[in-house]
């Protein structure tokens, strides 16, 4: 049994300005990470669902990127408070993938 029902990783990686891959941090991921943490705490999920800031998740072109385990669902372009709330409401609470933000698996094939 895992320690948390869900584990959410939010990329906050920083690269130098002008880097070819870009970085999630310059797209506002630090604020997104804080919103996840605050909202999960507000809803009473402390110790049940964990949101962690992460280094590079190697999905820079989709940033800010978020991955949720144990499902292994990857989300991209998570930029607004509404995106965070929708992921919490629909995925974390409702068990439904938020398709409009999901990064399809085939996007990771190189």
Image (tube, helix red, strand yellow):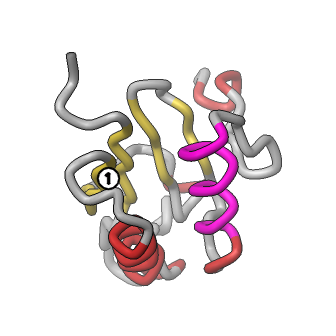
Q: Which residues are magenta?
A: 83-94
Q: Is residue 77 magenta?
A: no
Type of secondary structure dominating the magenta stretch: helix
Q: Is residue 89 magenta?
A: yes
Q: In the shown orientation, is residue 13 left or right of residue 26?
A: left
Residue 82 at what x, y percent from top left? 70, 75
Secondary structure under tag 1 reads loop
Residue positioned 65% across, 78% down in the render = 80
* Residue 74: quarter of image: top right
Residue 64 at what x, y percent from top left? 53, 64
Residue 81 at what x, y percent from top left? 62, 79
Instruction: Tell me: residue 60, above or below residue 103.
Output: below
Per the image, the residue denoted by label 1 is: 56
Q: In the shown orientation, is residue 43 left or right of residue 47?
A: right
Looking at this rendering, what residue extends furthest in the right direction? Answer: 100
Q: In the shown orientation, is residue 74 left or right of residue 72?
A: right
């Amino acid at each position: 049994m895992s320690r948390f029902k869900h584990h959410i990783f939010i990329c906050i990686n920083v690269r130098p300005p002008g880097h070819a891959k870009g970085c999630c941090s310059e797209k506002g991921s630090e604020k997104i990470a804080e919103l996840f943490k605050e909202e999960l705490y507000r809803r009473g999920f402390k110790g049940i669902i964990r949101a962690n800031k992460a280094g590079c998740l190697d999905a820079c072109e989709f940033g800010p990127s978020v991955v949720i385990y144990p499902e292994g669902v990857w989300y991209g372009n998570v930029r607004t408070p509404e995106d965070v709330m929708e992921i919490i409401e629909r995925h974390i609470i409702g068990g439904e993938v938020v398709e409009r933000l999901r990064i399809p698996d085939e996007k990771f094939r190189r």
